[in-house]
Amino acid sequence: MNMRRKLVTVATASALALGLAAFAAPASAQEKEKPIRIGVVTFLSGAAAGPFGVPARNGAEVAAEALNGGKVPAPYTAAGLGGAPIELLFVDEAGGTTKQVNEFRNLVQRDNVDLVIGYISSGDCLAVAPVAEELKRLTVFFDCGTPRIFEDASYKYLFRTGATATMDNTAAALYVTEMKPALKKFAGINQNYAWGQDSWNDFEAAMKVLKPGVDMGTSQMPKLLAGQYGAEISALLTSGADVVHSSFWGGDAEALILQGAPRGLFKKSTIVMTAGEPTLVRLGTQVPEGTVIGARGPFNMFAPDNELNRWFRKAYEDRYAVVPSYPAYKMVQAILGVKAAWEKAQAANGGKRPSQDQVIAAFENLSFEGPGGKVDMALGKGHQAVQGTAYGITKNVGGKVTVVNVKRYPASRVTPPDGVKSEEWIKSGFKTAK
Amino acid sequence: MASLVSVLIDGIIYSSYLFIIALGLTLIYGVMKILNMAHGSLYALGAYVAATLIGAWFNAGLNPYGSLALLALSALLVGVIAGPIIERGLLRFMYGKDEIVLILVTYSIFLILEDVIKLIWGVESYTAFQPYGLLGNIDIGALPYTVYDALLVVVAVLVGVAVTFVLTRTRQGKLLVAVIHDREISAAMGINVGRVYFITFTIGTMLAALGGALIAPKVSVVPAMGVEVIVLAFAVVVIGGLGSLPGAALGALIVGLVRSAAVHYLPEVELFSIYLVMALVLIVRPKGLFSAAEARKI
């Protein structure tokens, strides 16, 4: 269990790409490009592997292969990173923070990776952040949601290309208050650990600001991976809440739907699932109609209809025969962010391979495009991304689940300004939100 | 009042599930003096087999009600395959060793089984939700409950009655009780202790797998699902008294009702409530509520 899984993937396309490129560029210049080794850390075992870790790994493989083959649309048409092929080293994120800190040290000191992209768990992110700084190695968090990373400290070597969980819960509160202006009571069911507690606190605070005088019903906090929610569903049914907030993910989210739907929970209350999009991919029409779904950003069904998104969806579906869920999108977003920074730094360095410090300088305050649209590294002194998000409700059309009544929220409306902590920002009534 | 009814019903449903799993655990401990850490993985194995069979059943378009029989079949399959492999292949070489060594052995089996599950089913989740809604709902008080959950309670009662009957009314059962009481004397009296161990472990495995199979339609079958259940099952048998069948029943009922009451009235202490009860019981009865008096051996 929790065995370290390490796969070295050098996409075969890179050889082909280099071979083809040899016709257009001097052979010596291309051949001398040393591969850029990227440590990729996601859950490859345990409960978070299926819904998050594996789609993220798949996203990384699709992106690396396509980048090495020069098959990614503009502005990422150059092969690899500035012409150098990408080499991925996968590490399993399962096993807890102590193990992850050791694995991170191994990646940097033993495997000598050029950079690390990874981490889904906020706990792992909080543990790895100071070590990345200590080892002075460029590290990019792609998914974990805790706003505390850049709100409580500042880093030179650390970046995060995904928005924080504050955005998810603020936008959820905005969506339900706009959707149900007459709502009188809300309740929640969240997992009893940092992610669930932070999500509920943000949602509760945002609801109280947006709907002063609203009643708060029960706040259920079952243990992570509890699996059975019979009593919780009864409590929610008796609470009479108009809206039930849940940041459940993975198997817990699926179990809540499978147990709650037959008992009428989803009919009695509007259920808001802030990380519900992978569940939609997994359960399809089993997710009851009228469920409010978020994807932790403009991903999958919320992604813009641009060339990058079309390319990624097709490449992913062709390879894995399933639509990419948000962790896959966020992983690709991180890799493209690194590519944008790397090539900006390389251009400023006269076309020569940039140093780590040059890449970091280029990454700070960078704006880049991903399959989910534009990403601005606007918080945490240019190290933390902001991005808009979207919510919608499920509707079954032609035997397939779709999301309708989609509302989009720009980053400025659902994210605090730089230097302001999320909690204070929400309680202040979203001051400076446009 | 409505809330009190909900507390009772939710508690009894949860207790039923816990009882089936804890019964296997306590039976194995009672007879073999092995605290089986792999019990959770056998539970998960039952859930995975059930999810696979139910998936295939519905994909083949067969009679939906037949899927209910697959739940029992899954438990049987896991019991007669995994049980003997583990007992004959590994545990029998460890009998007589210190209980701590046996805990480590079963822990290693747990680790192996977790990876076996990963090798066979991967890390994706599996669902087998069809049987859960198949039998419809019943309204109790103001709340709807699924008939499947009522069925779960019936199965738990039947399993409890069947095991009690076998232990108290059949020759094999009485031999088993004799081994529980004193292994050495039983062996001296000509009881084939090895065979009793084999049967006990197989039945215990079957009960763990039955718990998993019955729960598969309600949950998403995911890696590590066995880890959570083993902690709860241990709490149940510790409260009831290790090796005691009525103890497992009472322990399951206490845990189920306490958890349900906490969820309804004080959700913030739900996680803590079970362990609080366990601690209180252990203060008063350090060996659990139904611990049998032990003969002192010199």
Image (cartoon, coloured by chain):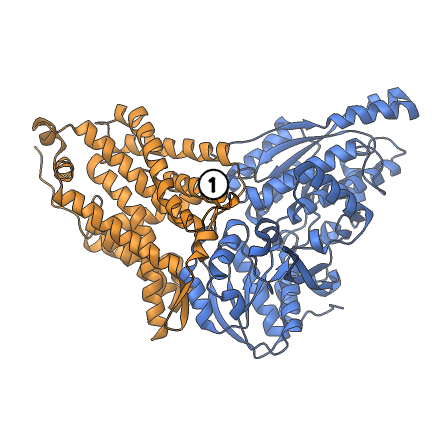
At horizontal 57% and vertical 51% (from top left) the residue drawn is: A283
B121 lies above or below B274: above
Res A25 visible: no
**Chain letter for mark 1:** B
Mark count: 1
Of the chain colours in the picture, the one used for chain B is orange
Q: Position of residue A234 (x, y in %)?
A: 42, 66
Q: Position of residue B114 (x, y in %)?
A: 44, 35
At horizontal 49% and vertical 33% (from top left) the residue drawn is: B120
Q: Nearer the viewer, residue A261 or A433?
A: A261
Residue with the mark numbered 1: B52
Q: Quadrant of residue A139?
A: top right
Q: Position of residue A20 (x, y in %)?
A: 86, 25
A159 lies above or below B92: below
Helix, strand or loop under label 1: helix
Of the chain colours in the picture, the one used for chain A is blue
